[in-house]
Image (spheres, helix red, strand yellow):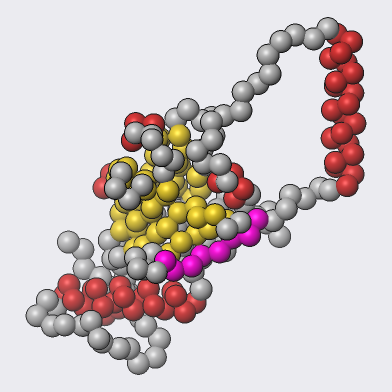
Amino acid sequence: MSKPIDYSKFDHIGDSDSESESGTRDSAAQNSSNEETSSSIQTQQAHSTQMPIPTTKTTQEPGTGRYVFSCNGQKVYAWDQNLDEVNVYIPAPPNLPASAFEINIQPQGLQVKIRSHDKFFIDEKTFSKVDKSESSWYLDEDEGDIHIVMIKAHRGQVWDSVLMGNCGIASQGTVDPLTQEAIRKDMMLERFQEEHPGFDFRDAEFNGNVPEPREFLGGVQYR
């Protein structure tokens, strides 16, 4: 079984990097410290070889309708989608300008970090391919979010999650089957409204399973 992602890395998104201790020690003290450290590591390995599995879930946010991915009870990001794009909303640490963040949107990946930090706190594959040249991001100071707009390379494709995780498995952030069906319905109605602007499809229903918006009746149109 693949090792699950350690989403505990999101716990302190706004914390500064830990500073290393200063000062010098004589060689005897260093040897003693090294021996104690080695003994401690061996003891820990003997007692446990597995990291605790973080508790993750995806729920729908009242009011906005966005899907919220949380880890150990803490919101990591919210997201939504339409025929053209996937929007990601990451709570931003307060009092930081847009220039403090480094956001890399790749054709099949997303990286997010604070520039003063050594490591990315998001560095994962996206659910599907992204049109990098058309994608963008900005800091929404009114909402307090980093808003990332990823343009779908395959217009009309339904994303079941935003990120796949380091193991290539989307299980931590995937919405449930009923929610997937609801997303397909919303996108199908968006497509119908776009292709037939003179009609109102807001209350339309489907008999049976909702078709895939990208493939239905010859495929979605590109604009």
Q: Judge from the rendering whether residue 22 lies leftward or rightward of residue 176; answer left or right.
A: right
Where is residue 171, by image quadrant?
A: bottom right
Give the residue at x 53% y 31%.
Answer: 16
Total numbered labels placed on residues in the image:
0
Counting from the top left corner in percent of width and height, residue 140 is at: 30, 46
Q: Give the quadrant of the N terminus.
A: bottom right
Residue in the foreground of this view, choosing between 199 and 223: 199
Task: Judge left or right: residue 3 versus residue 58.
Answer: right
At horizontal 21% and vertical 78% (from top left) the residue drawn is: 192
Q: Is residue 196 left or right of residue 205?
A: left
Q: Is residue 188 above or below residue 55?
A: below
Q: Residue at x 41, y 44 (%)?
A: 92
Kindly tell me whether residue 157 is visible in this rendering: no
In this view, the residue farthest toward the bottom is 207
Q: Is residue 132 above or below residue 208?
A: above
> Looking at the image, which residue is at 56% across and 42% down?
12
Above or below residue 186? Residue 120 is above
Q: Position of residue 27 (x, y in %)?
A: 85, 8
For the question of whether residue 73 can be seen, the reply is yes
Question: Which of the 4 image quadrants contains residue 40?
Answer: top right
**From the viewer's perspective, is residue 99 above or below residue 165?**
above
Name the chief secondary structure element in magenta: strand
x then y, percent, for residue 49? 81, 48
What is the span of residues highlighted in magenta in the rendered image? 54-61
Out of 43 and 171, give the one closest to the viewer: 43
Q: Front-most of 80 and 127?
A: 80
Quadrant of the frame with the C terminus: bottom left
The x, y position of residue 174, in whole percent, is 51, 65
Is 199 contained in the magenta span? Answer: no
Q: Quadrant of residue 83?
A: bottom left
Q: Residue furthest left?
A: 198
